[in-house]
Image (cartoon, rainbow, N blue to C red):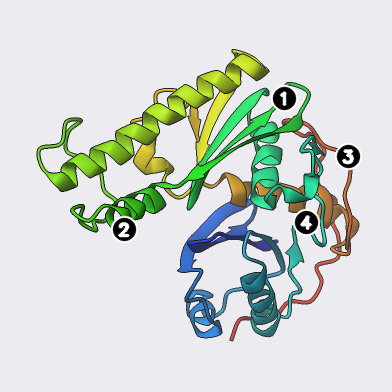
Amino acid sequence: MRLLAIDIGNTNITFGLFSAGKLARKFDLPTKSYNLRKLSSVLKEGSLVEACLVCSVAPLVTKILARDLRLLTAVKPYIIGKDIKVPIKNLYQRPGQVGQDRLVNAYAGLAFFQAPLVIIDFGTAITFDAVSKKGEYLGGLILPGLEISLEALSKRAALLPKIKLALPRELIGRDTAGSMLSGIIYGFASLSDGLSERIKQKIGLKAQVIGTGGNIRLMSKYCRAIDKVEQDLTLKGLKLIYDTIVEPHGQSPWHLSIPPVGRNPEQRPTAGSRGLRRRVK
């Protein structure tokens, strides 16, 4: 089975092609400049896509991408939240407000790690998500991301330059750019450590802190509270949803959900119909 898992974020669209159960390829496209030509160029000639799952925080791009995927692969993608409900108990006061990527991360976290969990996603925004020992999604926090914060400094302060995100050379900056980078990296690292400890006081001091997202490799060496790093948590969560929900039902689970599988699910998918498939042109 060749599964294409897609995570549509505000900055990038991340594609993960799974083959024989493993992540064989991963590539990104900028969300704002996405088009059919770019998608066609990254889906290599001769690639075979047999199923597709999409998790998105950009509804308009989702519609366009779903149309393009059907054109290129003859496979209709399953949209998380629309076609498939993430099987986790959601304790948000208004469950529909939670980003599907956050629920997918929580679901994957329960399968790969021991609950309770604090999941930090360093993306366009930085999100903290709390998962109880019972496997419930409790809620979380949302903060501006690293690039947003760096951009805000240069836009709102006349004497601060526009610079690219990078690792600081040292804690105490020796020039303006260095001071800005130190403030962003060390500042958000300390913020992450502090918030993680506060959340653990609420859900359990033995909670594991999991780091993920596009900037996790940049931040992991500075965040002391992070226990495990899984950069591809969302993609692997989509793969898990396919294995436990879609394939056992023969790839026709529209508006389907099943009870939560909990962590380390032993139930393996049964063989289902493979649906339409065509070589990418």
Label 2: how many Cα within 10 Å (few below 14, some 14–19, many 20+): few
First along the sequence among labels 4 and 3: 4
Residue occupied by mark 3: 259
First along the sequence among labels 4 and 1: 4
Residue at 65% across, 73% down: 60
Q: Nearer the viewer, mark 1 or mark 2?
A: 2
Q: Nearer the viewer, mark 4 or mark 2?
A: 2
Numbered tag placed on residue 81 in the rendering: 4
Q: Nearer the viewer, mark 1 or mark 3?
A: 1
Residues at badges 4 and 1 in contact (C-beta under 8 Å)? no
Q: Nearer the viewer, residue 49 or 258?
A: 258
Residues at badges 4 and 3 in contact (C-beta under 8 Å)? no
Q: Nearer the viewer, residue 138 or 43?
A: 138
Q: Secondary structure at mark 4?
A: loop
168 vs 84, left or right, is left
First along the sequence among labels 4 and 2: 4
Residues at badges 4 and 2 in contact (C-beta under 8 Å)? no
Q: Give me the C-alpha separation between circle 4 and circle 1.
A: 22 Å
Q: Give me the C-alpha separation between circle 4 and circle 3.
A: 15 Å
Q: Amino acid at mark 2?
A: Lys
